[in-house]
Image: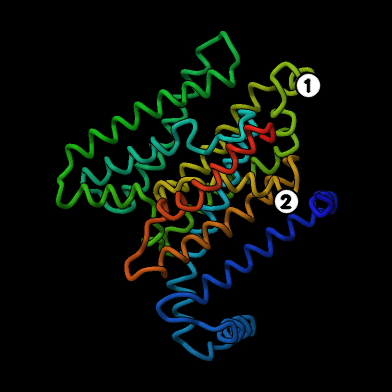
Amino acid sequence: MPALRIAQGSGAGGWWALAVLVACLLFALAQGRTPITLLDLWALASALLQGQPAPVEQVQTIVLQIRGPRILAAIAVGAGLAVAGTAFQGLFRNPLVSPDILGASAGAALGAVLGIYFSLGILGIQSLAFAGGLLAVALVYGLGSAVRQGDPVLVLLLTGVVIGSLLGAGIGLVKYLADPYNQLPAMTFWLLGSLAAAHVDDLPALIAPVLLGSGILLVLRWRLDVMSLPEEEARSLGARTTALRLLIVAAATLVTAASVAAAGIVGWVGLIVPHLARFLVGPSFVRLLPTSALLGGGFLLFIDTLARTLAPVEIPLGILTALIGSPFFIVLLRRASRGWA
């Protein structure tokens, strides 16, 4: 393990994460129905920096209007889910927690299927999904805070499981009532996750909440080290645990709801990426959160590139992330049984 110690001590793991993101970015720009070489990308970048027309207009159109917005959306969603998952794992002191633990994904999914059921446009569906995710976590936090006895973290966790199950039943009811020829396929496709509808006009509604929520968590990353301790120890160190917990949950929920509203249900990113980042830079949230953001953006960007290039039809993101995440989860459980997690 000497190499791991060097990476943790020097911060080299963060540079590796940045290199992964850059490599995935170049891979995503180059791959597609119309392949683009690295020389084409270099020529386009040079022309744009010098304020000159692109040497090949088709390359500029593909990069700036077709692949570019989708790439930015994938990076934002992946980074947001990874940061939220990292924050929740620290807050709940559980390495098997993911961003949907408090019902944000289930609430967003219920809002989206309701939007599809009432035949709303894409903006209406995404707005209902975003609102549903926020309302679900607000309900979970409100009910959890009403319970005065017991560990507040455990109470919040159990309340999230219960509300998530209830919202899942609501999703099933709406799907049962939906038109099986038009609405039900649209609901199923949305729930599997996709960035096929990403458009440049949709980016502000995604990137702004992700930047806001992630920025709050990054500012609080020193406090997250304290909040990962047991409740009494955190308070003895001067942490205002109740206010900090509310702020962390609100920021992570904002990021999760915005990501799910834009991409649908994309599982495993917020679970496996924090562990990969922890392997690179160690457990301290000072370096763990930024590294998770870089790895998460690169990971989902790579998955999205595979989703649109592997087959003649686009493969849903949720399927590919599950295919990669499930084996990783099995390995994680084996390590946990040995006392690693």
Residue 89 locus on image (x, y percent): 61, 35
Q: What kind of element bears circle 2?
A: helix
Q: Is residue 179 above or below residue 54?
A: above
Q: Is residue 274 left or right of residue 125?
A: right
Query: What residue does disc 1 label?
Result: 238
- As measured in the structure, the alpha-carbon distance from the residue carrying label 2 to the one carrying label 1 is 30 Å
* Callout 2 amino acid: Leu
What SS does tag 1 mark? Answer: loop
Choose mark 2 or mark 1, whichever is in front. 2
Q: Amino acid at mark 1?
A: Gly
Residue 122: where, in percent of width, then height?
Answer: 31, 53
Residue tagged by mark 2?
280
The residue at the point 53 percent across, 38 percent down is 98
Q: Residue at x 54, y 42 (%)?
A: 330
- Residue 25: mark in rendering: none
- Circle 2/circle 1 CB separation < 8 Å: no
Image spot of residue 154 (x, y percent) = 56, 20
Residue at screen point 50% across, 18% down: 144
User: Image point 37% across, 28% down: which residue?
Assistant: 165
Are there few (<14), some (14-19), or many (20+) residues within 10 Å of tag 2?
Answer: many
